């Protein structure tokens, strides 16, 4: 079901039930009253990543307090996307963008991965999570992706389950088109690994190429920046193996 | 042939011939001397969009003057990519990004298109062109895409040649996967049209859907922002019809 884009959408942490009013916290109050300037009686869409999407009515019981009262469920809660997105942190601004794109393109789990050449650090997972919920708000996504604690690439590969395939972007031996490689993948569970701007180290590339669950894909004849490669890879993966079908 | 990424790459307008020294202009001087801090004798790669890529030696005949002397051609000039990228302007920051991504993904022509819901304006085509050459510098692209003057969508469609297909991103009638639609396209010449954030107007959508050279493609079940849709569409197009094969 298509998301409604004429109404604003807000992420809340509380449970969503008919007529069970939620008080806006101070950030939400500021956003609703001062940024969106919603008047008493205005309608807004609420979601919490668990209870689907609800149309709610906004009221000002006092000048400094907002209540949001869910009235009807507009969309049920979909199951979480299965696709896992494993990514080496980039510098802050670019990482925000990368995370937004992963959410838009249907990742269900975002797993930061520390590699030898990382340029960025995950200093604040809550900030990353806020970024994820904001992307979900803007794009009408109801199953909010989970953000995991960072893990070292070596540890990730050592503990990797054997029923999920890791696809990663690399200059493959098999030409430049990822589609033939993707069409031969048998697993239904998929993860995409996007390395840092500096690329993987030789040692890491050796680890990846020798891991039974890992498949490299090329992405054309040109070098792509990490965030471009991420969206491009997600597109061909979703179209070949994922939920675009 | 893979681009060399250990050496800096600089776009120049002059012809590139062996031993035919080029004087750096003031912007280039500042970049080479103060930003990159290249010393006398340093090597740098030059390209101009016509003569391939050349390894050149930098020298300071005086403290305030840099000469760049091409020594050997490292890569020949490739033919320009055929893919045309037609795009409604976005707000400035996001448009820079959009243009960079189009260059990385192999567009040969960038054609700004004015639609009813455009949010941005092209106030400065030279700025856009500078953006394009910078993206080419960073990604080792030698055939620098051409940036055309903006055109109204209606005029574009009225004067469109019949040997090139326009693919545009829309909720298609045929499900969510673009690959089947793309695989049925017969033309070898392709253009991708990406609309504004607000989408096309009803009148524009009617024009597009009734134009014999236009094919809509869906891009999955989620709503995508214009710049995400652009990269995702370019990926599936290049993989199905373009130079990823």
Image (tube, coloured by chain):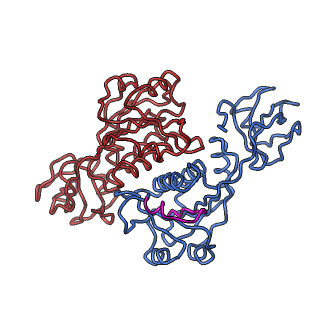
Chain colours: A red, B blue
Q: Nearer the viewer, residue A138 or B203?
A: B203
Q: Nearer the viewer, residue A181 or A123?
A: A181
Q: Residue at x 42, y 44 (%)?
A: A182
Q: Residue at x 27, y 54 (%)?
A: A10
Q: Is residue A45 above or below residue B49?
A: below
Q: What percent of the width, then of the height, locates residue B171?
A: 39, 65
Image quadrant where one finds the N terminus of chain B: top right
> Going by the image, does B201 lie left or right of A171?
left
Q: Nearer the viewer, residue B78 or B37?
A: B78
Q: Is residue A173 above or below residue B119?
A: above
> Going by the image, does A214 lie left or right of B32?
left
Q: What percent of the width, then of the height, locates residue B38?
A: 74, 28
Occupied quadrant, residue B35: top right
> Going by the image, does B238 lie left or right of A166?
right
Q: What percent of the width, then of the height, locates residue B187?
A: 58, 65
Q: Nearer the viewer, residue B82 or B32?
A: B82
Magenta segment includes B181: yes
Query: Tag count in the figure?
Result: 0
Q: What percent of the width, then of the height, locates residue B203?
A: 46, 78
Q: Is residue B38 above or below residue A234?
A: above
Q: Is residue B4 above or below residue B124?
A: above
Occupied quadrant, residue A9: bottom left
Q: Residue at x 39, y 22 (%)?
A: A154
Which residues are the magenta region?
B180-196
Magenta segment includes A10: no
């Amino acid at each position: 079901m298509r998301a409604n884009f004429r109404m604003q959408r807000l992420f809340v942490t509380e449970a969503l039930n008919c007529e069970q009013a939620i008080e806006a916290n101070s950030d939400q109050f500021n956003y609703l009253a001062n940024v969106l300037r919603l008047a008493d009686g205005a309608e807004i869409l609420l979601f919490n990543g668990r209870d689907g999407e609800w149309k709610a009515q906004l009221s000002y019981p006092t000048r400094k307090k907002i209540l949001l009262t869910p009235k009807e469920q507009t969309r049920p809660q979909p199951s979480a996307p299965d696709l896992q997105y494993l990514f080496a942190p980039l510098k802050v601004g670019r990482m925000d963008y990368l995370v937004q794109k992963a959410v838009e393109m249907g990742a269900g789990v975002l797993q930061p991965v520390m590699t030898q050449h990382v340029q960025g650090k995950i200093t604040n997972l809550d900030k990353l999570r806020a970024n994820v919920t904001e992307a979900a708000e803007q794009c009408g996504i109801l199953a909010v992706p989970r953000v995991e604690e960072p893990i070292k690439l070596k540890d990730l590969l050592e503990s990797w389950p054997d029923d999920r395939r890791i696809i990663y972007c690399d200059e493959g031996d098999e030409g430049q088109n990822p589609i033939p490689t993707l069409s031969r993948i048998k697993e239904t569970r998929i993860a995409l690994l996007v390395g840092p701007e500096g690329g993987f180290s030789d040692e890491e590339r050796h680890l990846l190429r020798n891991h039974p669950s890992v498949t490299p894909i090329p992405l054309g004849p040109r070098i792509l920046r990490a965030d471009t490669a991420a969206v491009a890879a997600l597109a061909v993966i979703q179209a070949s193996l994922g939920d675009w079908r």
